[in-house]
Amino acid sequence: MFALTRFEIRKLTAQRRSLAPLLAIALMNTLFALAFTIRLHRAGDREAHRAGGRLVREFMNAFVYTQTILAPCVFMLFPVILAVLGAHLLAGEFETGRLRLVLCRPVSRWQVLLAKFSALSLFSLAMLICLLTVSYGVSASLFPPTGDVIIPGPMYMLERHVIIHAAAEAWPRLLLSYALAWPMLMSVAAMALMISMLTRHFTSAAVLTATVYFCSYIVSGIPLLSTIHPFLPTRYLPFWRYVLLADIPWGSLLRDAGWTAGYTAVFLGLAAALFSTRDV
């Protein structure tokens, strides 16, 4: 398994598509640095919205920057990247016939699938670490490296009011939110592998994975369709956001973490079942 996983990681990092996360992180940091700088100059001396009379300038720091950039990357950018990479890693190899060469070795199909999932999981962890280090490094060079953190609840699909964390809590909350975002990305990777087995076509697998993921979010925001909200995976995947609340609801966090693990297992189980019956 170790050799298989190492082989899949080398294949994953050797292709040009693996540069997409670096380009996305660089682009996001460019936009965020520009936006934070403009806001600091234009509204730094204004009162921050619902912040108890405190000024905007007080919250223009590296902690706020690094925490805020996590949301668009984990909710949108990274899942799309994993959809493409996951589709290429399995459905793409079906199309090109490379999977036949792998299965000529004395390994079982479930081991090949698990190795691909492990490679995608480690790659998603590397994306999060890169986002954390690059974002904090860029922001700390432009803004104060420490300070209180302001959390706009609606941005993270939490409470409607603003949450403020003292500087002493910033690092623990920041690191925990990044760490708990990893299982979410792992589940998206498992979904990509499952849909790859359904279609066995690179383009269809990538598009369908992204479509299923984003449609789930869209449907979860429509009250008329509330009867199916409890069955949507995206209802539980972003459980990392709970650590941004003033008082962490550990019960809800563990419940959603359990659901996320369950969905990941189901995605992998279906992928393995389909893989075992497919003629390669």
Image (tube, rainbow, N blue to C red):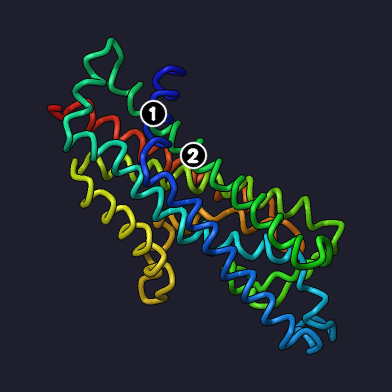
Q: Which disc number belongs to residue 123?
A: 2
Compare residues 272 and 206 and report the one nearer the observer. Answer: 206
Asked which quadrant contains residue 144, the reply is bottom right
Q: Neighbour class for label 1 at 10 Å: few (<14), some, many (≥20)?
A: many
Q: Is residue 144 left or right of residue 19?
A: right
Residue name at image x 74 percent, y 84 percent: 41
Q: Residue at x 48, y 37 (%)?
A: 121
Q: Which amino acid type corresponds to the residue marked 2 in the rendered image?
A: Phe
Dividing the image into 4 quarters, which one contains the N terminus? Answer: top left
**Would you place residue 183 above or below residue 158 in this image?**
above
Name the one closer to the observer, 122 or 190. Answer: 122
231 w.r.t. 126: above or below? below
Q: Residue at x 37, y 68 (%)?
A: 219
- SS for callout 1: helix
Of mark 2 and mark 1, the one earlier in the sequence is: 1
Across and down, in percent, residue 107 comes to: 30, 14
Check disc 1 and give the amino acid type: Glu
Q: Position of residue 241 (x, y in %)?
A: 62, 58
Quadrant for residue 201, please give it: top left
Would you say the residues marked 2 and 1 are in contact, meaning their CB atoms lie under 8 Å apart?
no
**Circle 1 sits on which residue?**
8
Image coordinates of residue 106 in percent, x first then y, are: 28, 10
